[in-house]
Image: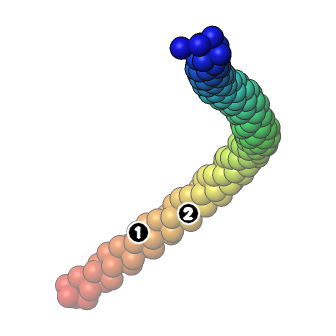
Amino acid sequence: MDQQQAQNINQASEELTDSARQAFQMLADRTVSLQESNLRLTQDFFQNWIQTLQSQTEGNRQAAQTVQEQSERQQQALQTLTQESTNAYSEFLNSALSFYQETLKSATQVAQNNMQAASQATQQGVQAAGQAAQQSVQAASQAASQSAQAAGQAGQQAAETANQTAQQNQAAANQAAQEGAETAKRAGRRSNS
């Protein structure tokens, strides 16, 4: 084998080796590039996933905070509404109670006035009845006294009249007895003669 062939063989070997080395280098570079690409994709995926989770967590936190704020506002509104309703009902009860107290006071005053008027009227009636009774008693006493006087006078007159009549009757009886005795004496004389 000559020197030219040996050089050709060496050159071909070197080209083959260089070609193989370049192929392996390209393959290694491509593998590294794929790995880097996969790593970037994986990192991007996890970063996106983490960002998505963080975004969802933040959204959930904000939603929970909003719900809590709305709940607090609703509680405040409910407390205000309850307080206002309680105040309105309390004012209504107070006004109704005041009206009832005023009505009761007025009714009590009217009743007291009526009782005073009735008491005065009763006292006046009792006084008038007492005066009328005294006047009636006085009139009855005067009438009884006058009647007694009239009865006494009438009794006295009747007694006098009866006494006079009795005396007249006695005198008439005495006279009749005398006349009867005289008549009997005359008759006895006539009989004797």
Q: Which of pointers 2 and 1 lies earlier in the amino acid sequence? A: 2
x 51%, y 64%: residue: 162
The amino acid type, in three-letter code, at marker 2 is Ala
Image height of 55 relative to 120, above or below: above
Outermost residue on the front side: it is 2
x 33%, y 82%: residue: 183
x 53%, y 14%: residue: 1
Closer to the camera in the image, 20 or 59: 20
Secondary structure under badge 1?
helix
Read off the residue under disc 2. Answer: 158
x 33%, y 79%: residue: 180
Q: Residues within 10 Å of mark 1 (few under 14, many from 20)?
A: few
Q: Could you give the CA–CA distance between mark 2 and mark 1, rounded to whole angstroms?
A: 23 Å
The amino acid type, in three-letter code, at marker 1 is Asn
Q: Position of residue 37 (x, y in %)?
A: 65, 25
Which is more foreground, mark 2 or mark 1? 2
